[in-house]
Amino acid sequence: MKLEGRIWKFGSDVDTDAIIPARYLNQSDPKELARHVMEDERPDFFQKVRRGDILLAGKNFGCGSSREHAPLALKAAGISCIIARSFARIFYRNGLNLGLPLLESSEASEEIREGDRVRVDLTTGEIFDVTQQKRFFANPIPAFMQELIRDGGLIAHLQKRGAKGKRQSSNPD
Amino acid sequence: MTITEKILAAHTGKKYVSPGDLIDARVDLALGNDITAPLAIEAFERIGAKKVFHRDRVVLVPDHFTPAKDILSAEQCQVLRRFAKAHRLSHFFEIGEAGIEHVLLPEKGLVLPGDLVIGADSHTCTYGALGAFSTGVGSTDLGAAMATGRLWLKVPESLKLIYFGKLKPWVSGKDLILFTIGDIGVDGALYQAMEFSGEAIRALSMASRFTMANMAIEAGGKNGIIEPDGITLNYIKPRAKRSYRLYRSDPEAHYADVREYDVSRINLQVALPHIPSNVKDVREVGRIEIDQVVIGSCTNGHLEDLRVAARILRGKKIAPSLRLIVIPATQEIFRQALREGLIEIFLSAGAVVSPATCGPCLGGHMGVLAEGERALATTNRNFRGRMGHAESEIYLSGPAVAAASAVKGRICHPEEVLRKGA
Ligand code: SF4
């Protein structure tokens, strides 16, 4: 799976309140959420972001609440992939569960610049900065999670496998 | 193995698990609220699931925007209500019997030692205070777990935090956890289990233990956990309606890191904007005037927190320029506070007392901040804009500093208020 897009660069510890403030969480329509994504951080982000763009961040991206509205809003706004030095763990799960690819690379996080064109190969973890002609490698996504992304997220994955967990529904004390 | 590894192994049917293992674990309890459950229910339906895995083990608590603050919030609550009815859930809590989920579930005896609990809310880690493994997940995970009763998890490495010594007056679990986050940073325990241990933890009340486990997520932790002891059992015994298991870490268990804190050297703490690790000793924050104080939330809305606040506010008035909002975390705490005369003390001091809700903690309602305003809150996050306008500021503290500061109109140590003519 290959992606190409323009880079939007953010700093470290971008929290879920910054990604999508709670005042918009009285509903969960992805299009409506997308309209307010990153609004307190960069008020014009939604106007300017284009389908396929890639978000780049420092450490601990998506820290804070478990609101899946955060990756959902980014995805609905057109973000195709997020590269960061590290991710907060619930955000990481949520992103992958929604089929939004997340890559971790300290070098890419530091060296890639705002506005650069970047090509990402999800299978190999290769990140190529076309503008700067620089190549980086992300920590590989665990095979199990690659399977989730390939299936298009956890729900599609479960649909495909027929929610097989249902067989194991007993829950002894 | 550590206590976390033992609980995970037990829920995977294995004798042994180690950090990094991907496991498919059995879930004892799955929780959702009015923000996260609607998406989870959507995911549940998209999977094509017809039944929840167990009607006693899926808990829905509308608490964030309740009593419904607007039409959209009311509709979200309605989604939960309808789902709870259709699936005959045993535990759906309507306002009037409810409260903030993470205080409510333990109070109702729904979480027990040794359990594996997931919740579509990051502060689900609170229940680790009871010796359970509990962690926050997103809505899709919750939807899948409601259908299957299972969840994939990566076994986390454990970080052992040992606290020794005797607490100074007024210092509580909130100060210990703020100090710890200040020390290790907001990603200091990323992907890790934070195991709180040592004589100072064993001496802590249940409320203070909940507060500490509650904020494990603020250090990036997957879960926070405390080995159950006599204090845990005193809390659990009158509440438990099913059996439970007590786990302890083996003496030779492996830890990613071990840190020790002498609590006798930890003073009252305040986290400054806009990140919970920006922590200072209350005596070192300088002169910071505030517009609003909030005492409540899943972190510090316990009865014990209200008692501490009342001890300081008794017979006092809050500063004229300031608003004080007190939010008992559950209806039961509210009633008990009423019986003990705490509510009267708050009202006489000039506070408003809100029904149990998350309310201002996430900038939802019941005390949202205007541009340029400053709040001191006993909540857990002070991210930019969390309580309202992006240009407002949030300071975090425990209930003692919050109550004292409400009297002074600026952030201060309780002794400043109690010293003269108390
Ligand atoms: S009180 Fe605040 S932190 Fe706790 S569950 Fe509610 S919104 Fe989240």
Image: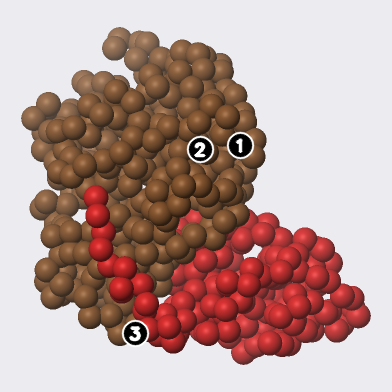
Chain colours: A red, B brown
- At label 1, counting other C-alpha atoms closer than 10 Å, the crowd grade (few under 14, some 14-19, many 20 or more) is some
Single out the mark in the foreground, 3 or 2: 2
Vertical order, B422 against B55 (above or below) = above
Question: Would you name the residue on which mark 2 appears?
Answer: B2
In x, y percent, where is residue A114? 77, 74
Point 23% across, 31% down: residue: B235
Residue that badge 3 annotates: B46
Which residue is painted at 35% across and 11% down in the image? B420
What is the CA distance from the residue labelled 1 to the residue labelled 2? 8 Å
| Disc 1 C-beta below 8 A from ligand 1 | no
The answer to whether residue B347 shows anywhere in this view is no
Type of the residue with mark 3: Arg
Cα gap from disc 3 to disc 1, whole angstroms = 40 Å
Name the residue at 17% across, 29% down. Answer: B342
Between residues A167 and B85, which one lies in front from this camera angle?
A: A167
* Chain to which mark 2 belongs: B
Q: Pinpoint the chain carrying mark 3.
A: B
Dividing the picture into quadrants, the one containing residue B167 is: top left
Percent across and percent down for residue B356 are 21, 49
CA gap, disc 3 and disc 2: 37 Å
Q: Amino acid at mark 1?
A: Tyr
Q: Secondary structure at mark 3?
A: helix
For the residues beneath circles 3 and 1, the answer to whether they share a chain is yes
Residue A105 location (% of width, % of height): 75, 65
For disc 1, the chain is B
Residues B282 and A8: in front is: A8
CB-based contact (under 8 Å), mark 1 and mark 2: yes
Residue B241's x, y, as percent?
Answer: 15, 43
Give yes or no for contact between labels 3 and 1 (Cβ–Cβ under 8 Å).
no
Q: Which residue is mark 1?
A: B255
Left or right? Give the position of B346 relative to B218. Answer: left
Mark with earlier residue (1, 2): 2
